[in-house]
Image: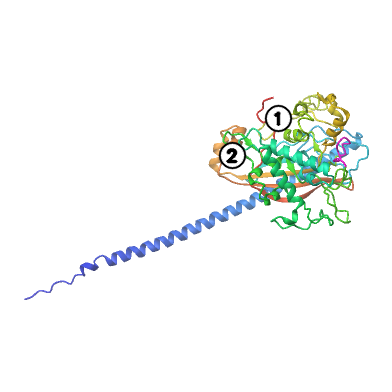
């Protein structure tokens, strides 16, 4: 009897079903993995969006609180100035001891309270699990680049040379120092951008400051607008540390377009951004008001001698006219402790104010008026004309400020790492941490409306690429 041989698969087709099953399994696993990854990514994006929303709310709250403090301090200073018939303001500020004289430079013969550098300590706080760093920059401590396009050609040239010197000096001693020839090219590019605004790549907006008789002239809405010009490098607008761990500042800590404000009177717009007392304004021939008169309306030409960085002070004049050693004496004067101001009414040392590193902020000497220049060694060596020129470019009051808030949402591991470090080392370590962070700037103008001090946001929200470093008189603590 013949036995049937069991039927077997074709040897060429053996394992095909198994391979097909394996491929189907791989496809299914891949699909599931992609779905899981997409879901996790969406969840992560949603969490980041929620965190950014919380950070924005925290930033907005910090800015609102800072504006309130600026307003309250200004109102208190204005009242104190009236009660005392002018003179210095209160000794203990919160965020700023920032007097305001009004939209029309009012105040009569009364001298507004002077603004002091020690009134701007960097603050650190926390809101809804978001770490905040609040830096207030005095815009009147910077030189206004709009002075390069004054109608008075001589004054415009003086403004141009000051901008050149600032660009030449502001990164001196770092690997990113700007050579003099490059500084001249950059300053010229900025000037041409304003004088030939209609030819630039960025469309020219319609502004109240437009001059109907000169449609080519256009004022920038901020320093970063100059980046639209190909000859202005973006690296100038970054704060960072070089390879030698030396801080490299942004040009926005030394130059501004905001230090000359006015309200619209309803008439035709003038090519000016200064208070109605517009001596020294764009289109006028006089020096910046607030010079020797200390009216407080600087017109953007004068800078605050109490708050201006050394670079700005030393750039105001050619070193052959006013030697930098004179400005070193000015800087030394405003960094000496005012022992009397550190005492309370009972003659005891007042309650301390601490900076972001937990160190006490000392009450320092300051220039209550430009007459205090008599106390500076070397002032008596200048002739009358030179003294007048110096005073024309200085003031002791400020009206416009930048509120810069950096928000950071740390992780638990980061907090544990930072808790073991002191305040300075922790702040330094924060710079390299990968945590989610956001830096926002708001420009505010402090002025008086019907005898009430108000703080008006003029540039409410601008995201910055990096958190600015505070510009110190003695960055290496070598005095």
Q: Which residue is label 1 attached to?
A: 360
Give the color scheme: rainbow, by chain, secondary structure or one colour.
rainbow
> Where is residue 447 drawn, in percent x and y?
84, 45
Q: Residue furthest bottom?
A: 1
Relative vertical location of residue 365 with respect to residue 436 in this rendering, above or below: above
> Where is residue 458 drawn, in percent x and y?
77, 50
201 vs 81, nearest the viewer: 201
Q: Which residue is label 2 attached to?
A: 430
468 horizontally vs 152: left or right: left
168 horizontally vs 281: left or right: left
| Res 168 quadrant in image | top right
Q: Specify the segment rendered in magenta.
A: 286-295
213 horizontally vs 253: left or right: right
| Res 142 quadrant in image | top right
Residue 293 painted magenta = yes
Between the C-alphas of marks 2 and 1, the distance is 22 Å
200 vs 426, nearest the viewer: 200
> Where is residue 115 drawn, in percent x and y?
81, 36
């Amino acid at each position: 009897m013949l036995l049937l041989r069991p039927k077997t698969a074709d040897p060429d087709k053996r394992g095909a079903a198994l391979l097909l099953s394996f491929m189907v399994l791989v496809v299914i696993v891949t699909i599931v993995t992609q779905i899981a990854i997409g879901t996790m990514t969406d969840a992560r994006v949603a969490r980041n969006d929620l965190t950014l929303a919380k950070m924005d709310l925290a930033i907005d709250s910090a800015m609102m609180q800072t504006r309130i403090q600026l307003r309250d301090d200004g109102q208190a200073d204005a009242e104190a100035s009236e009660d005392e018939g002018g003179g210095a303001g209160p000794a203990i500020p919160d965020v700023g001891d920032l007097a305001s004289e009004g939209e029309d430079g009012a105040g009569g013969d009364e001298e507004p309270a002077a603004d002091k550098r020690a009134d701007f300590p960097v603050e650190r706080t926390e809101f809804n699990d978001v770490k905040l760093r609040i830096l207030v920059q005095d815009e009147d401590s910077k030189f206004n680049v709009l002075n390069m396009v004054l109608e008075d050609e001589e004054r415009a040239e003086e403004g141009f040379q000051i901008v050149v010197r600032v660009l030449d000096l502001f990164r001196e001693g770092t690997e990113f120092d700007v050579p003099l020839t490059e500084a001249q090219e950059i300053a010229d590019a900025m000037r041409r951008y304003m004088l030939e605004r209609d030819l630039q790549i960025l469309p020219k907006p319609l502004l109240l400051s437009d001059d109907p008789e000169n449609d080519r002239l256009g004022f920038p809405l901020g320093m970063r607008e100059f980046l639209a010009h190909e000859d202005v490098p973006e690296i100038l607008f970054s704060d960072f540390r070089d390879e030698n761990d030396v801080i490299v500042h942004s040009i926005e800590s030394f130059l501004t377009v905001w230090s000359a404000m006015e309200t619209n009177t309803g008439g035709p717009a003038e090519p000016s951004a200064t208070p109605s007392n517009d001596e020294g304004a764009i289109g006028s021939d006089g020096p910046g008001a607030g010079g020797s008169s200390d009216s407080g309306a600087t017109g953007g030409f004068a800078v605050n001698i109490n708050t201006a960085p050394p670079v700005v002070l030393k750039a105001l004049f050619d070193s052959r006219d006013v030697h930098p050693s004179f400005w070193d004496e000015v800087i030394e004067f405003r960094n000496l402790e005012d022992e009397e101001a550190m005492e309370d009414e009972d003659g005891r040392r007042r309650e301390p104010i601490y900076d972001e590193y937990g160190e006490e902020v000392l009450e320092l000497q300051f220039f209550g008026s430009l007459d205090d220049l008599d106390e500076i060694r070397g002032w008596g060596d200048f002739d009358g004309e030179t003294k007048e020129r110096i005073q024309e470019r200085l003031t002791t009051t400020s009206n416009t400020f930048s509120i810069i808030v950096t928000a950071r949402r740390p992780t638990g591991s980061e907090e544990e790492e930072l808790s073991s470090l002191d305040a300075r080392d922790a702040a330094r370590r924060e710079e390299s941490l990968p945590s989610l962070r956001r830096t926002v700037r708001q420009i505010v103008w402090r002025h008086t409306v019907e005898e009430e001090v108000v703080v008006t946001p003029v540039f409410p929200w601008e995201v910055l690429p990096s958190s600015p470093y505070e510009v110190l008189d003695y960055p290496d603590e070598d005095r």
